[in-house]
Amino acid sequence: MKQPTDREVRVNTQIDAFIAALLKPDRDRLEKLTSPALSYGHSSGKLENRAQFIQSMLDGVSRFLSIELDNRTISICGDVAIARHVLFAHTHDKGKEPGTIRIGILLVWRYEQDDWRLLARQAYRLPQ
């Protein structure tokens, strides 16, 4: 098994920080972790830009009570990192009953402003 590079370790650290920010949304943290050009895709097909994503997190439109990640992979090419994982979460979105989700996630991170920032996120339904 190969050892992760320093860059892979840093991207992984940013992923952990992003998950923590999803659990306890804070505008400053979310802005620091995301690119101004963020494209955030939900498994429903809904797309949000950075401002919409952050506001929906702060307003509880999307609300995560717990998150676990499985099957994490990171691939780096230049100043771009592609990360994939399976996300299992307990949720309680605004206007909905509490629920659980198990979805696939693709994250695209770009090295900008001296750190890795989330450029794109796409959630997708997993095969049954």
Image (cartoon, rainbow, N blue to C red):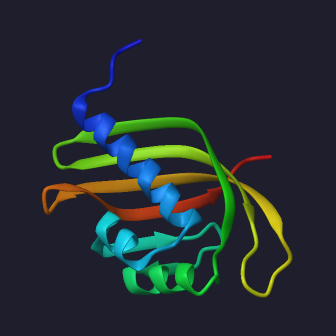
Q: Residue furthest top?
A: 1
Query: What is the x, y in percent for residue 47?
Result: 51, 79
**What's the residue at 30%, 46% (across, down)?**
81
Q: How many marks?
A: 0
Depicted 30 relative to depicted 86: above or below: below
Q: Quadrant of residue 103?
A: bottom right
Depicted 128 relative to depicted 92: above or below: above
Query: What is the x, y in percent for residue 104?
Result: 61, 51
**What's the residue at 51%, 57% (across, down)?**
20
Q: Residue furthest right?
A: 97
Q: Is residue 70 left or right of residue 39?
A: right
**What's the residue at 48%, 64% (across, down)?**
21
Depicted 7 relative to depicted 58: above or below: above
Depicted 45 relative to depicted 120: above or below: below
Q: Is residue 59 left or right of residue 7?
A: right
Q: Quadrant of residue 36?
A: bottom left
**What's the residue at 33%, 64% (across, down)?**
33
Q: Is residue 126 left or right of residue 7?
A: right
Q: Residue furthest left?
A: 114
Query: What is the x, y in percent for residue 113?
Result: 14, 63
